[in-house]
Image (cartoon, coloured by chain):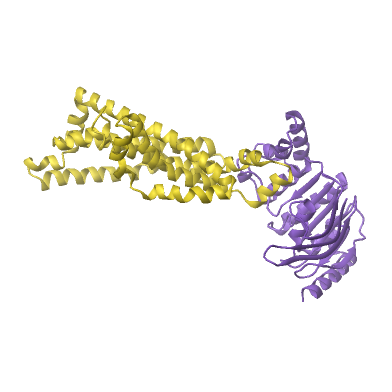
Chain colours: A yellow, B purple
């Protein structure tokens, strides 16, 4: 009963969307035009049903997932280090934060070809794109979390002789965990997008899922293309869920933001 | 245990919070400071704790074992009651066994034994305050500072915790210094009540409280009590005018 109440609304929306899709495809498009919006079951049958095609998709997906994951891990380590440094000294924050914001505003994806020329079109450049895209939300959220301690909590630690590192480790860091997870959820999605869209510019080397999408597009293989897009977004959803799940395990017992609402 | 001589506090923005405060808290004394809001009561307590420096005058504190109870419970929400109470011993790097022993005793003392595994989010405001008290008790304070500790609680909880505090005071015999804006609370809990004036806070009244310990809740309704409360209130109004 509870399960039904929880899952019925999104399932209903899903069915409605699929229904609309069928309607649009069947009623608005002639047979020759149908490649513009292939029928959903054709996407499944042609995109995933053919073993060779499926293998191609999954290999590409695995590569993109690796790129996104390595990028996210690197971004996480860099961002947390920077945020800790900024939280410890105002001058570090004043020196670095404007550039963190700048990072958010430059169109990283437009610069991808440049990275290719600078660092080659291999794994490293692809990861770099993900790092640059994923960095800012992680920095901003971690810093916000480290700052979220109250002045009374800081007084308590000071009064009882806790130094800078003890205060960081036993107070600021645990207090920041919920925000860090928020940052991870946002950045994980961005990192996947970085890996997929960055691919558009990396025609050389092993094909990631983005290269395949581009390839199918140019060949007008729209069933395969939609299958690849579905897989790429499934990857994004999977990482988002994963970090939501992890947040629930780690901070769910004490932090409201990840607790299931009571009904 | 604690002595202020001619203590003044001026902030960087030029406002003067306290002026020329003389104050002594002897062992076995519980002194309350009442005053209008914004008269520098919290500054006085922070100076007493060493969290803030006096701009003028001298502060003498004869012990390192200082307990400080903040306006709100200031618990760490990710820690259980047990581990919140162990925090201060942990910051002092005391061995695990010592930590546990002190925490167990303190939790028992405030009557929260059955809640040791709960997190602060699962407790009522009054219980959280008890945890905060227990946490301070683990440093075995010789000087106990209270910054309007029950200000955010409802009247009934407030009175219960007041009785709890009196019990701890007679049991442990620490020197206490509390700031509050409740005259009744100050009178009920203290051996002496000081009245501060409006900002900049100066001591404008010093009342010895003659009631013997242990005190019972009915004390609040006795003539001598209400009479003294009236005198302190009058003094407070005079200073706030």
- Viewer-side residue, B68 vs B85: B68
- Viewer-side residue, A110 vs A1: A110
Quick check: A258 above or below B187?
Answer: above
Residue A192 horizontal side relative to residue A92, left or right: left
Instruction: State the residue lying farthest toward the bottom.
Output: B241
Residue B218 horizontal side relative to residue A33, left or right: right
Q: Is residue A258 visible?
A: yes
Quarter location, residue A195: top left
Query: x%, y% of residue A34?
Result: 11, 41
> Quadrant location of the N terminus of chain A?
top left
Query: x%, y% of residue B65?
Result: 81, 43
Quick check: B236 above or below A97?
Answer: below
Instruction: State the residue lying farthest toward the front.
Output: A118
Quarter location, residue B156: bottom right
Residue B87 horizontal side relative to residue B56, left or right: left
Residue B70 horizontal side relative to residue A240, left or right: right
Query: x%, y% of residue A111?
Result: 31, 43
Quarter location, residue B14: bottom right
- Viewer-side residue, A218 vs A249: A218
Residue at the image position 77 percent from the left and 35 percent from the top: B102
Residue at the image position 78 percent from the left and 36 percent from the top: B105
Q: Is residue A262 visible?
A: no
């Amino acid at each position: 009963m509870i399960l039904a109440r929880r899952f019925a609304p999104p399932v209903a929306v899903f069915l409605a969307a699929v229904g609309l899709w069928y309607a649009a495809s069947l009623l608005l498009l002639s047979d020759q035009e149908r490649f513009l919006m292939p029928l959903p079951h054709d996407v499944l049958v042609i995109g995933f049903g053919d073993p060779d095609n499926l293998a191609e998709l999954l290999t590409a997906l695995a590569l993109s997932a690796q790129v996104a994951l390595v990028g996210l891990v690197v971004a996480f380590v860099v961002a947390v280090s920077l945020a800790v440094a900024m939280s410890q000294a105002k001058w570090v924050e004043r020196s670095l934060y404007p550039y963190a914001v700048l990072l958010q505003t430059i169109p990283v994806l437009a610069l991808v070809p440049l990275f290719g020329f600078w660092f080659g079109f291999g794994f490293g450049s692809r990861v770099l794109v993900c790092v640059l895209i994923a960095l800012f939300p992680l920095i901003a959220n971690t810093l916000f979390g480290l700052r979220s301690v109250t002045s009374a909590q800081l007084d308590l630690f000071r009064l009882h002789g806790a130094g800078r590192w003890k205060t960081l480790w036993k107070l600021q860091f645990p207090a920041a965990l919920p925000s860090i997870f928020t940052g991870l959820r946002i950045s994980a999605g961005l990192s996947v997008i970085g890996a997929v869209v960055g691919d558009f510019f990396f025609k050389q080397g092993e094909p990631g899922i983005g290269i395949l999408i581009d390839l199918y597009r140019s060949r007008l293989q729209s069933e395969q293309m939609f299958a690849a897009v579905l897989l790429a977004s499934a990857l994004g959803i999977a990482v988002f869920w994963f970090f939501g799940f992890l947040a629930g395990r780690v901070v769910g017992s004490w932090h409201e933001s990840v607790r299931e609402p009571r009904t | 245990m604690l002595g202020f001589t001619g203590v003044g506090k001026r902030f960087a923005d030029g406002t003067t919070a306290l002026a020329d405060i003389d104050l002594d808290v002897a062992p076995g004394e519980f002194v309350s400071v009442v005053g209008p809001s914004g008269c520098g009561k919290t500054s006085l307590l922070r100076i007493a704790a060493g969290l803030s420096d006096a701009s003028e005058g001298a502060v003498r504190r004869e012990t390192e074992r200082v307990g400080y109870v903040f306006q709100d419970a200031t618990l760490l929400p990710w820690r259980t009651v047990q581990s919140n109470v162990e925090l201060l011993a942990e910051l002092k790097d005391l061995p695990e066994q010592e930590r546990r022993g002190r925490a167990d005793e303190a939790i028992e003392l405030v009557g929260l034994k059955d809640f040791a595994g709960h997190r602060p989010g699962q407790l009522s405001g009054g219980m959280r305050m008890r945890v905060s008290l227990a946490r301070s008790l683990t440093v075995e304070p010789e000087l106990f500072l209270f910054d309007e500790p029950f200000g955010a609680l409802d009247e009934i909880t407030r009175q219960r915790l007041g009785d709890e505090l009196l019990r701890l005071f007679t049991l442990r015999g620490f020197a206490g210094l509390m700031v509050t804006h409740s005259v009744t609370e100050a009178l009920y809990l203290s051996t002496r009540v000081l009245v501060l004036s409006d900002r900049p806070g100066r001591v404008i009244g010093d009342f010895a409280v003659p009631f013997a310990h242990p005190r019972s809740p009915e004390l609040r309704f006795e003539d001598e009590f209400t009479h003294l409360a009236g005198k302190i209130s009058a003094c407070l109004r005079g200073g706030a005018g």
